[in-house]
Image (cartoon, grey):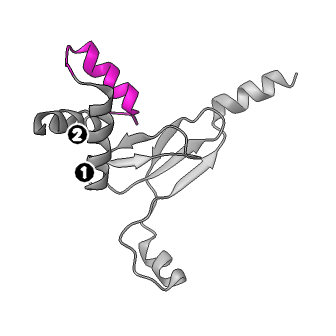
Amino acid sequence: MADNRKIIRDMVLNSDGHPTADDIYQELRANGQKMTLATVYNNLNSLSRDGEIRCVSFNEKTQHYDKPTRHDHLICKSCGRIADIHLDDLTDKLESDSGVTLDSYDLKLIYICPDCQKRAHAGAR
């Protein structure tokens, strides 16, 4: 149903974070929306395929959804936290180095966030 698609797209586009399908489903339920989890997944897959939203994942674990605007991500390999980072567009450099024309690229910088570093340091004591 087109209304479900619009509702889900708007939730992703208006989000300050990187919601998962379950996050969206739980928010829909909390707001009294009658939609199945399968409907949420189907719409997210369709919206992502059509370029209306982005799918962000790390190590094929949980998929998160984001705005389609050009930006990159920092992903903590310990807790999975995702943060937006705005770096200079690397398209020209990547095309020059690879010898191909790119439609787009998805840069994910994998690191250990400060909170996880603190927890690891505190656990080592």
Could you tell me which residue is drawn at 54 percent across and 46 percent down? 74
Q: Is residue 63 above or below residue 71?
A: above
Viewer can see residue 51: yes
**Residue 43: image location, x then y, percent:** 26, 40
State whether residue 101 is above or below residue 28.
below
| Number of the label disc, if any, that sits on residue 98 | none
Whether 25 is among the magenta residues is yes
Q: Is residue 70 magenta?
A: no
Residue 67 shows in the view: no
Q: Which residue corresponds to mark 2?
A: 9
CA neighbours of label 1 inside 10 A, class few (<14), some (14 to 19), many (20+): some
Dividing the image into 4 quarters, which one contains the N terminus? top left
Compared across the picture, whether 49 is left or right of 85 comes to left
| Image quarter of residue 33 | top left
Q: Are the residues at dot 2 and dot 1 in contact (C-beta closer than 8 Å)? A: yes
Front residue of 4 and 114: 4
Callout 2 amino acid = Arg
Asked whether 60 or 86 is in front, the reply is: 60
Earlier sequence position, callout 2 versus callout 1: 2
Rendered image: mark on residue 52: 1
Q: Nearer the viewer, residue 61 or 39?
A: 39
Where is residue 122 drawn, in percent x and y? 79, 22
State the residue at coordinates (59%, 47%). 59
Q: Amino acid at mark 1?
A: Glu
In the structure shown, which secondary structural element does the residue marked by tag 1 occupy? loop
In the rendered image, the residue lying farthest to the right is 125
- In this picture, which residue range is highlighted in magenta? 15-34
Q: Quadrant of residue 44?
A: top left
**Residue 72 at x, y = what percent?**
45, 53
Q: Residue at x 32, y 32 (%)?
A: 38
